[in-house]
Image: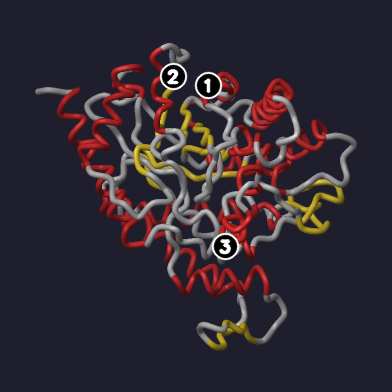
């Protein structure tokens, strides 16, 4: 990503709505290997997962979603994560070593509201996710998977002309969050083993000419899930180790080709235990990526723009504040979006702000908190808001 020169650019966090037929194919892949049919009480019986058929549909879906992003006015586009069951759990299919039992998650905020917790964990995406523990040495198992992602996006971009393109990848820290360690002697050894195993994917993306987004909800969401029992200073030390492992994996990759996404969890919960941005932003800025993406539109974090009244943006860094929500079907008014962009631009410089979304719109296959048609309307509003703000900051 490059600093803005003549207008505010736009992007989003990564996952986008998947076509319904692709969702059904991925359900089959995740939970019905080896069967001749897939039973779905809402749709009857459908064909079993078939690798070649799924691969073709993913390629088609990437082309479709890339075109929709450009049509909506998004500058930095991606593949919508069409090939992945989620931004994090996809790695179980690309790395060897995950053969243990599934993880059990306790969200500190949801524990206070049991009925809501049941609803959140019962959505079609989360209820189907698979998170087997690491119980053997980690190693690259499928070197061609990321090559497929690269090829699909390259093919899609032949028909579109966006400002730029990116692919997303799980950070070592978020892998450790979802897949507990049952093999390595301690968490630090586990993190660095993940870092070494993931380096192939990181380099494959940037070597192909795309920007790479590292998904790092562990630096924020990890506070009230993975490390809820720790004190804040203890959590900060763990988060610093997560960043050290990430930087190790990214060694030699130009920071301007990298962006980091910080997230407190893309679920509609109370979030009253979220760690404040002020307590972790220095750790996030210590990571190698030049651009920092973070939630800035939802009711729990929209006020944190004020942090930048006192905080000086480090040299060489950019920010991608979320100026549209990822869990609400409200379509933000373009004027509100423009106000949010302008607020940050006045504090850190117009060249250093790219307008983004709080989080993804298809975090887990089958999860659809926001209606797919509304997603595209929200992204179009994002682009319109950026145009309005640009007229203020780049007056002819």
Give the Cα distance between marks 2 and 3: 34 Å
Q: Residue at x 47, y 52 (%)?
A: 15
Q: Is residue 307 above or below residue 153?
A: above
Q: Would residue 292 appear left or right of 201 to someone viewing this image? A: left
Question: Is there CB contact under 8 Å for labels 1 and 2?
Answer: yes
Measuring from the top left, give residue 24's x and y in whole percent: 53, 74
Q: Earlier in the sequence, mark 3 or mark 1?
A: 3
Which residue is disc 3 drawn over?
125
Q: Earlier in the sequence, mark 2 or mark 3?
A: 3
Question: Is there CB contact under 8 Å for labels 2 and 3?
Answer: no
Measuring from the top left, give residue 389's x and y in whole percent: 21, 30
Q: Would residue 338 appear left or right of 363 to someone viewing this image? A: left
Give the Cα distance between marks 1 and 2: 7 Å
**Residue at disc 3, secondary structure:** loop
Which residue is disc 1 drawn over?
278
Q: Residue at x 34, y 17 (%)?
A: 347
Q: Is residue 386 above or below residue 180?
A: above
Q: Is residue 238 above or below residue 222?
A: above
Give the Cα distance between marks 3 and 1: 31 Å
Measuring from the top left, give residue 124's x and y in whole percent: 56, 66
**Residue at disc 1, secondary structure:** helix
- Relative depth, front residue between 34 and 20: 20
Instruction: Say few, some or many: other residues with alpha carbon within 10 Å of mark 1 (under 14 / 14 to 19 / 20 or more).
Output: few
């Amino acid at each position: 990503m490059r600093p803005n020169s003549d207008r505010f650019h736009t992007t989003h966090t990564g996952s986008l709505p998947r076509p319904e037929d692709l969702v059904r194919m991925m359900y089959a892949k995740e939970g019905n290997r080896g069967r001749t049919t897939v039973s779905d009480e809402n749709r009857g019986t459908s064909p079993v997962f078939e690798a070649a058929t799924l691969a073709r549909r993913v390629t088609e879906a990437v082309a479709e979603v890339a075109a929709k992003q450009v049509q909506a006015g998004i500058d930095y586009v991606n593949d919508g994560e069409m090939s992945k069951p989620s931004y994090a759990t996809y790695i179980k299919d690309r790395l060897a070593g995950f053969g243990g039992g599934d993880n059990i998650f306790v969200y500190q905020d949801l524990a206070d509201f049991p009925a809501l917790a049941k609803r959140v964990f019962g959505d079609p995406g989360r209820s189907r996710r698979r998170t087997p523990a690491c119980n053997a040495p980690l190693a690259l198992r499928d070197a061609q998977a990321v090559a497929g992602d690269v090829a699909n996006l390259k093919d899609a971009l032949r028909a579109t002309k966006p400002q730029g393109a990116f692919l997303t990848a799980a950070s070592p820290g978020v892998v450790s969050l979802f897949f507990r360690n049952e093999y390595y002697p301690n968490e630090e050894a586990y993190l660095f083993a993940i870092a070494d195993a993931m380096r192939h994917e990181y380099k494959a993306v940037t070597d192909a000419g795309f920007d790479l987004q590292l998904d790092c909800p562990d630096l924020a969401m990890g506070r009230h899930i993975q490390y809820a029992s720790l004190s804040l200073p203890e959590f900060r030390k763990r988060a610093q180790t997560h960043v050290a492992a990430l930087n190790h994996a990214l060694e030699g990759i130009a920071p301007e080709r990298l962006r980091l996404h910080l997230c407190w969890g893309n679920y509609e919960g109370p979030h009253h235990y979220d760690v404040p941005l002020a307590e972790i932003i220095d750790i996030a800025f210590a990571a190698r990526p030049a651009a920092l993406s973070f939630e800035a539109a939802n009711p729990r974090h929209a006020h944190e723009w004020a942090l930048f009244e006192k905080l000086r943006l480090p040299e060489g860094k950019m920010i991608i504040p979320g100026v549209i929500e990822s869990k609400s079907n409200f379509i933000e008014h373009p004027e509100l979006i423009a106000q949010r962009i302008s607020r940050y631009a006045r504090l850190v410089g117009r060249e250093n702000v790219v307008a983004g979304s709080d989080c993804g719109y298809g975090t887990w296959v089958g999860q659809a908190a926001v209606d797919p048609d509304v997603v595209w309307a929200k992204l179009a509003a994002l682009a319109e808001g950026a145009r309005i703000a640009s007229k203020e900051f780049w007056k002819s």
